[in-house]
Image: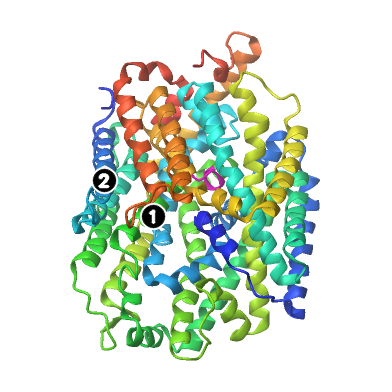
Amino acid sequence: MPPASEDATRRAALVALFIGIAAIAAGYATAFSAGKTPAWAAWLLALGIPVALAAIMILGAARGRRGIGPLKIPFAFVALVLVIGFGAALALPATEGPLSTLWLGLPARAAIVIYGVGLLPIVVLPIAYALTFETQTLSAEDVERVRVLARENQAAIENGTREPMDNQRRG
Amino acid sequence: MIQTASVSVLLQVALPNAARPAVVAVGILYFAVVLGISVWAARRTRTARDFFVAGKGIGLVALTVASVSVSVSGFAFIGGPGFIYAVGLGAMYIVLPAAVTNVMGAWVLAKRMRLLGEARALITIPDAIGARYRSRAAQGLSAVAILVGIVGYMATNALAMGVVINSIFGVGLGWGIWIGMGVTLAYSASGGILAGIYNDVFQGTLMAVASVLVFLFVLNFGGGLGEISRTILAHEPTFLGPWGKLTPLAALSFFFVFSMGSLGQPQAVHKYYMLRDPLQLKWYPLLKTLGLVLVLLLYFSVGVGVKAFVLSGRLAPLASPDQATPALLLNVTPIILAALVFSGVAAATMSAANSFINIGAAVVTHDLPVAFGRRVTNELRWGRTVTVLIAIAAAITAQRSGTMVAFLGIFGWGLFASTLVPALAVGLNWQGATRAGAMASIATGLIVTLGLETAAYWKAFTFPAGVTASAVAMVSSFLVFFIVSWLTRRTAPTQIDPDVRLVMEI
């Protein structure tokens, strides 16, 4: 799907994103086609959503041929947390009752979802983003490269040697 | 987040009259601060860039708090807790994505949007789409999609403001709409986004303080989360199941739409242009996520807490689920806390309205003319004029027909998600995406969302349990984007300007 020059990480992320979205679409399609939504339709979403979210984050974080570097660990961790959280909620038996053991104030399946899916990624992802920001996301040199190009463009436009870029041969 | 449902909830809920002296006093104080900030901001707004993107000069903390404020509407305070009260923990799947959405937005969009602003002096989201695909048509089509979504949001937010202000001051719904819209208009038209941002900072802080105080109060009043859970488990164990009373498919659909869909919400994405120093993005996701968690504490604690209090007989049964927050505030909490929360709800609706007015004005005065190869000569003056017109149109629409407003309010979030996420979020990170793919995807999102929502609203079509128009439109839009881009892939390399390519490669 991507052009040949696209790096391997982005290509893999695009394929994963497509597969994740296709799985979600298949989940909805079964709900439309069958008289009653089959139980495995929810499994398609439970797997497709983490794959799609992790894939689009990798797509955004991938940096040329360097790929995602150390970010592979937090991305894998979060995808796993989502899959395990949704999977546990789907697979574990419903035992909620007055005598249920509570985990931090909630019955087990609810605790897995609220604390696992809802809170664990907060501890990992934004910290990983901040710690890898200069190497993986944006450095002062990157900003300067963009500013230099912008100044060159502006100078060329003011000298009349170049059309403004946003007015070039648009469809 | 969560704007869509807000209105349908606020439309159905007749908030009780909360006009007690303390509530009115805090309400007046709130409006006085808003007007003070607006006067200050108006003196600093001199150009269209000041008006639409605050001259690209907002600091990290201010931008973070403002972004939290516009991400959460009155739904988080009124409709959301009511939704939990009605369906149990399944309602949490609307807010659980907040754990990943902010950092996902930072990786996928923030850097590239901010650098595009640096390279091209862009000020709107359609600007970014036009620059990415080198296409006025794509810019125009995305502008139309945003405008359609804003029409719905504005009418519903105007009505929501009317409901809240009527509840605080007891002035009647009609006057509530005009007062709320008048104050919002005063700062939107005079100070533009600068006034909006600093009012958002004030409003977001108010919302966070109110939310944390209510959370602590509920836990204390209920004897801790464990006691609250025990009470519920003794009567309605399903409520605390992982899906509540929803089907797994419905709960997971919420998670999908509110996670992936967050990448297409213009009120949040637009903010990336405004950060003074791009390198400050480093701490933006962490701060915004923490801010959102604080604001959403009320959503969870009131929904679950009120359920337990009603089941244990400490609170009378509710007339409707949406009375959960008002019933707790007016019957159980100290009145000053009620006053803070009611002002917080007004703040949430005004903050959202201001943001949408500003984006709508930019679409009309900037994006649509650019799409037709023209430029408005005085964008600041026309921006202010269109701001006034949008606000008046929204207030009039909100007054006229509850049914029509309810319909308009349904599709905002899903429309933005299905029209913008593939073309913008994927397109800025994939050089193989093509102009044809982007336009087909935007058109698909627009047509599928409007078609399915219209058919469902007028009962010409019933969705299978757990499936929503927003979700179907978003997956359709994604698939069309991939397929058409693949079919037209030979054109991709010629459609990216060198500076845009640099931004995409960094």
Magenta part of the protein: which range? B264-269
Q: At 49% from the left edge and 66% from the top edge, which residue is drawn?
A: B80
- Give the quadrant of residue B430: top left
For residue A148, say whether it is visible: yes
In the picture provided, is A44 more to the left or to the right than B98?
left
Please state which amino acid type lies under the numbered disc 2: Ala
In the picture provided, is B235 more to the left or to the right than B403?
left
Q: How is the image coloured?
A: rainbow
- Give the label on residue B100, or none: 1
Dominant SS type (magenta): helix
Q: Is residue B44 above or below residue B216?
A: above
Q: Is residue A141 above or below residue B180?
A: above
Mark 2 and mark 1: Cα distance apart in space: 27 Å
x and y, in percent, of residue A13 in the image: 27, 39
Q: Residues within 10 Å of mark 1 (few under 14, many from 20)?
A: many
Residue at the spot of label 2:
A29
Q: At 40% from the left edge and 52% from the top edge, which residue is drawn?
A: B259
x and y, in percent, of residue B467 in the image: 34, 52
For residue B56, say whether it is visible: no
x and y, in percent, of residue A45 in the image: 26, 52
Q: Secondary structure at mark 2?
A: helix
